[in-house]
Amino acid sequence: MNYCASPYRHARRDTRPVVIGDFENGGVLVGSSNPVVRQSMITCSTLDTDACIQQSMALVEAGCQIIRITAQTKRYAANLESIVAGIRARGSNVPVVADIHFKPDAALEAVKWCEMVRVNPGNYADSKKFNIREYTDEQYAEELTRIEAEFAPLVEECKTRNRALRIGTNHGSLSDRIMNRYGDTPLGMVESALEFAHIARERGFHNFKFSMKSSNPKVMIECYRLLAARLTKLGPDWNYPLHLGVTEAGDGEDGRIKSAIGIGSLLCDGLGDTIRVSLTEDSPNEIAVCNDLLAQIPGLTDTTADTLDVPLAYDPFDYARRATPEIELADGIKCGGEQTIRVVVTQAAWDKLVTRIQPGDDVKPEAIYEELNVMEVDPREAFSINCDTQLVTVKDDLDLPTITAFRLLAGRIKALGRTNPILLKDCLHFGDTPLEPNIALLRAAVVIGSLLCDGIGDTILVRGESGAGQSLRLAYNILQAAGCRSFKTDYVACPSCGRTLFDLQEVTARIKARTEHLKGVKIAIMGCIVNGPGEMADADFGYVGGAPNKINLYVGREPVRFNIPEAEAVESLVELIREHGKWVEPSGETVHAG
């Protein structure tokens, strides 16, 4: 299956255009040859008209091109009339998307007022109760008939009113029906979306796009690639646009890195027509990151490079770390095989860091690049390797995008019948002016994160960030965000919306203050139950809004404590972690990777 024109040469996926709003008067045209569109979501209650208008206009001022507003019931959806009217009265025709979960009647109300409606196939007329049940083919068909009866009226309204749809599956909210047939898999996400697409197409409606969001960049990348391949296989008229996003990415550097890995990797593949960077921060911050991320893609890709006839060394639809032998990297440090992915620094960086490294630090250089026995090659040219234990990397200063270069290197090694470990670099050449830290972070995350999610890489070297300490921290944070190495607490935090039942930014900061020393523990902080239990499937503990001022606590996806007063909930979470043997007292030492 082909998900893009070439994994070695950038070519934007050709899609049909989708019209969102009045294109002649401020609407947007998504897909085809149009630039990638930036969108975000307001965070206040949809019943607070003035706050919604104010937040929407702040997003417009920041450059947001599509604004999403949640509508949890028909009552909330009805107030979209006033909100949209207020935005238009302020002089903006920015398209507004109603975000719908669970309630078809809310969707049928929202479509009257909004240019687009987003539905989640996992919970639109379907159930998510973690029930285990076997479906016969007949029972499965009956369920699809029931779902069609619920979804078809919305499709007809969209046709009548010239609206658009987003069919958006979430890894955290696949229905029990899909879970029981396909499991918690990228295939299940794709099949769930295609069921709804078939219903729309059977009614002659094509003004829709897809999304396949997950808090895990590896899963997200696999899902979009699989969807693109399936759409290609279904036929040329299935070329619908794609909306990209890593959901519940979190805040700060971690949220930006995780989003850059997932979104940036796919943009470099030529996939993606609209994007959202989901941060647990004020919404306008998301647009700034969108702008910076989109600006990096041309410099990380090449539309003219020779595609070369080199088979891929990885399966783009099923992550597996590339198999290599274990080798000695430095004194007492090994890489490859079952070893964790290692962090290398330059001699110049080591000289600056050596006096700051403390015994027991989790974040520290593990080898010096100039001291390694590493073979540097141009992967466009033929080369030979005498043994599988030779560490290999790409030469500097090649006129070749870094992602392309390392994919070619892995393919060349495989073609030689070798399995050599590979050292990844975030860049192959340097400009005269150091990159701004926020740009260096995004570029390194896209390049190294993309390759790690392909399963390529046994050790990494970050040089685009000029500061020695910052580059070391960035290397470790990329490994953590890509799910390749855990050196600190991992947080899955949603970005907030009108459904959120507590102040996510404030609560996330409080939880981090109490738990950020818990190396290897994963904590989910979710504002409501829409994606909460599912996205927490691989988290150790979950903190979820259950009702106003009330919190439910989870162990994995199992709720274990209910309706805890918000003022007591953080300490109750700490007690829960302690009960499960994962609590340690803070040592007072600083984690230098932040």
Image (cartoon, rainbow, N blue to C red):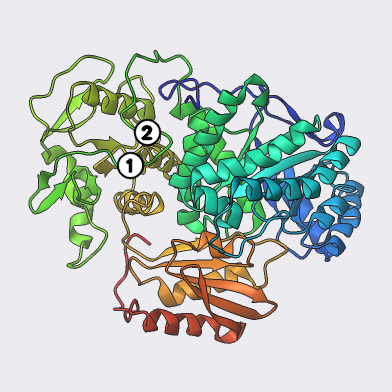
Q: Which residue is drawn at 77% across and 65% down?
A: 45
Task: Determine whether 261 is above or below 410 in the image.
Answer: below
Task: Determine whether 405 is above or below 147 in the image.
Answer: above
Task: Determine whether 86 is above or below 445 in the image.
Answer: below
Dot 1 alpha-carbon crowd within 10 angstroms: few under 14, some 14 to 19, many 20 or more: some
Q: In what element is the residue under mark 2?
A: loop
Can you tell which mark lies on residue 44? none
Residue 178 horizontal/vertical position (percent): 58, 50
Residue 543 horizontal/vertical position (percent): 54, 73
Real-space CA distance between mark 1 and mark 2, rounded to the nearest whole angstrom: 8 Å
Q: In what element is the residue under mark 1?
A: loop
Q: Nearer the viewer, residue 122 or 287?
A: 122
Task: Tally the numbered discs.
Answer: 2
Can you tell which mark lies on residue 315? 2
Can you tell which mark lies on residue 320? 1
- Sequence-wise, the earlier of marks 1 and 2 is 2
* Residue 53 visible somewhere in the drawing: no
Residue 467 horizontal/vertical position (percent): 33, 48
Amino acid, disc 2: Asp
Viewed as shown, does residue 317 lie left or right of 412? Answer: right
Q: Which residue is drawn at 23% across and 45% down?
A: 345
What is the quadrant of the C terminus in the image? bottom left
Viewed as shown, does residue 482 lie left or right of 560? Answer: left
Q: Residue at x 12, y 39 (%)?
A: 372
* Residue 520 visible somewhere in the drawing: yes
Residue 499 horizontal/vertical position (percent): 71, 65
Q: Are marks 1 and 2 in contact (CB under 8 Å)?
A: yes
Q: Residue at x 90, y 48 (%)?
A: 112
